[in-house]
Amino acid sequence: MELPGDIPNSELHFFIKQRRAVHFAWLSGAGIYHGGLNFGAQRSSPNGDENFVENKALLDYSKLSDGADVIKPTSMAVSEFHFLLLIGNKVKVVNRISEQIIEELQFDQTSDSIGRGIIGLCSDAFAGYIYAYDQNTIFQVSVQEEGRDMWRVYLNMKDYAAALENCRDPFQRDQVHLAQAEAAFFSKEFDRAAFFYAKINYVLSFEEITLKFISINEQDALRTFLLQKIDNIAKDDKCQITMISTWATELYLDKINRLLLEDDTTTKDGDSEYQSVIRDFRAFLSDWKAVLDEATTMKLLESYGRVEELVYFAILKEQYEIVVHHYIQQGEAKKALEVLQKPSVSIELQYKFAPDLIMLDAYETVESWMTTKNLNPRKLIPAMMRYSNEPHAKNETHEVIKYLEFCVQHLHNEDSGVHNLLLSLYAKQEDDSSLLRFLQCKFGKGRVNGPEFFYDPKYALRLCLKEKRMRACVHIYSMMSMHEEAVALALQVDTELAKAEADKVEDDEDLRKKLWLMIAKHVVEHEKGTKRENIRKAIAFLKETDGLLKIEDILPFFPDFALIDDFKEAICSSLEDYNKQIEQLKEEMNDATHGADNIRNDISALAQRYAVVDRDEECGVCRRKILNIGDYRTRGYMSVGQMAPFYVFPCGHSFHAQCLIAHVTRCTTHAQAEHILDLQKQLTLMGDDTRLLSNGSTEEDTVTSLSSVDKIRSELDDAIASECPFCGDLMIREISLPFIEASEDQQATSWEINHQSISHRSFSLAI
């Protein structure tokens, strides 16, 4: 580049920052030519222009002097924001951006150097120092915080971005934002002004700014200011955020209403300003739902008539009761059910709105109930009864019955209220097949100690009688074991039904016969037809009873003037049966007589039965010889000669009486053992009394006492000698007893092997 003019000492200087030249200054004859350096510009230039000099400018020397004479600097230095120009013996500091002289530097020279003046300026780019020198001295120029007022320089030039970049504290930034806001406000760009006003924190108060917009009736700009202010407020200042957001809500609502008043067609245009404001308002509610006061916001929405926004806000705040109530009023049952099915919605709302929903759309409501978990059908009974009381078409699917069947069959509900309601709905249907099928199902079958059904049978009976469902009543009577009533009612409906009910009684022969007599009487007295036909029907009926009824049982039901000839065949058949029974009884009596004779013979033989005891036979308990002579007197028994009393069993085992008593009492139950010991004690006492009576009493008293002794001894024999203790049940029960009793623990311990005393020895085995 070539510039006009002549200067004896032209200089080119660079300001280096982080080892890279940022801008330059050329001391030329025409002025100071300066600019910024961007070494990446030539790469991004679409034209391939390699010029990387930006913001070029020429500082005319005329700006450096107040007079008419233009004095050119003899030397210069460059800092980040300033030029240091040597003019005479002074250094003038010129701001590079504003091109204004901000300071003049004087040097304290020695007397020898004053006449010759300052020779020049130089700088150390890396160290950041600037030096001035004369003939004898070097002066250092200190640069401290030269950028502290640059924000104001840029602000005066209205370069707001650069001014903000050079601000060093919030107050300086507020000054820049205020200047931007005032400029936009003056040019009537109120939304833009509101944006900058919202960033001011110190130089202007919140009230002053809002009054600016209120005074000129700029509601939109005020709303913009409030929205921006909310974003800039600290999150912990919840009170102020809530107040400002509530004010913004009211401004939104006012704007929406004004748009509606201006043009009614805006509601139909999806791209209109009205729709845009609605979308912005809903986004605002969604963003600030946590800080907006719920009650105040809902009152505002309600007072402005914004029902849709009220519902939207209620959903955001999880006030689902308001939402569901709105949808029901609008007749939108499906939307209301979708809200109720959300996991966060309380199950109690299902019960609260069930009556309204089922009347609004029964199908959708029941489908929703069937897909909802943890729903208690009992709490839905009022809603279902309200729906059931309304008239329905014949071919219409009864939705309540469908839901109750789902509860009973799939959910296995056991609530009596649910079963009773389903029963009542079945009873009101024209076809009683569903009712009978329901009564025959045993829903509780399989439960431990549980009922076979969960409905109230008494209520079911009253209901079926009221609705005249006789077959159902018959089934309920039978289920309640009221078979006579069941058969009596069944005879009013169908004779075959009565027969089936009579056959259900199996364990009570007399009751079964009574029921069949009731049926027989009905057949005889109420069947239509001639007398002979009724008689034939009655005789045919007898065959169905499988011999339970005879002709003589039904004869009283026929009129007195009935001819015997009509019953001849049946009477003869009955007489033949009686004859067979008599013959059979005779055979049974002969068999019984023969058996009694055999028993008497056996008893006689038992009286003569004996057993041979070997002289070496041992007692099964004490292992001493049975026939040894010694003192073996036993309580309650008299010794036979010099031998102790003993028992001999058919199996061959023999026992001393005392040993047998001791063994049985030890092995039997505690109660049986006490009974045996008590009998033994009675025998001992009565034996002593007998001896006393024999010394000083009549013969009759003695015989009576002896008979009592024999009776007690017989009881004792039955208790201890009814069977051999080694071959009978007593030995079988001992299988479950442990080998080692509790009293034998010490002996069992002695059997334990002491591992320490065992020496292990190994042997080799040659194979």
Image: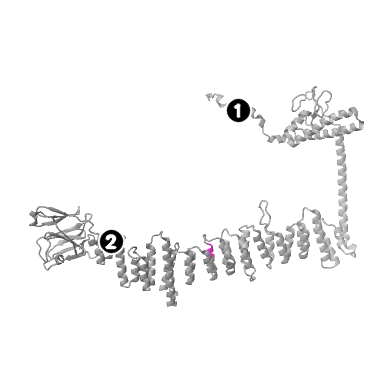
Q: Principal SS element in the magenta part?
A: helix
Give the residue at mark 2. 165
The number of numbered discs placed on residues in the rendered structure image is 2
Taking depth in this image into account, of 252 and 413 the one nearest to the observer is: 252
In percent of width and height, residue 305 lies at: 48, 72
Which mark identifies residue 389? none
Q: Is residue 301 magenta?
A: no
Magenta extent: 337-341
Question: In which quarter of the view is residue 608 placed?
Answer: top right
**Residue at (47%, 69%) from the top-left corner?**
300
In percent of width and height, residue 557 lies at: 86, 62
Position of 281 with respect to 538 (left or right) is left
Which is closer to the viewer, label 2 or label 1?
2
**Residue at (78%, 63%) from the top-left corner?**
491
Secondary structure of the residue carrying tag 2 is: helix
In percent of width and height, residue 165 lies at: 28, 61
- Distance (Cα) linking label 2 and label 1: 98 Å
Taking depth in this image into account, of 509 and 418 the one nearest to the observer is: 418
Taking depth in this image into account, of 427 and 541 the one nearest to the observer is: 427
Coloring scheme used: one colour
Give the residue at mark 1. 752
Q: Residue furthest top?
A: 629
Quadrant of the drawing holding the N terminus: bottom left
Mark 2–mark 1 CB contact (< 8 Å): no
In percent of width and height, residue 210 lies at: 37, 69
Position of 172 with respect to 561 (left or right) is left
Residue type, mark 2 in image: Glu
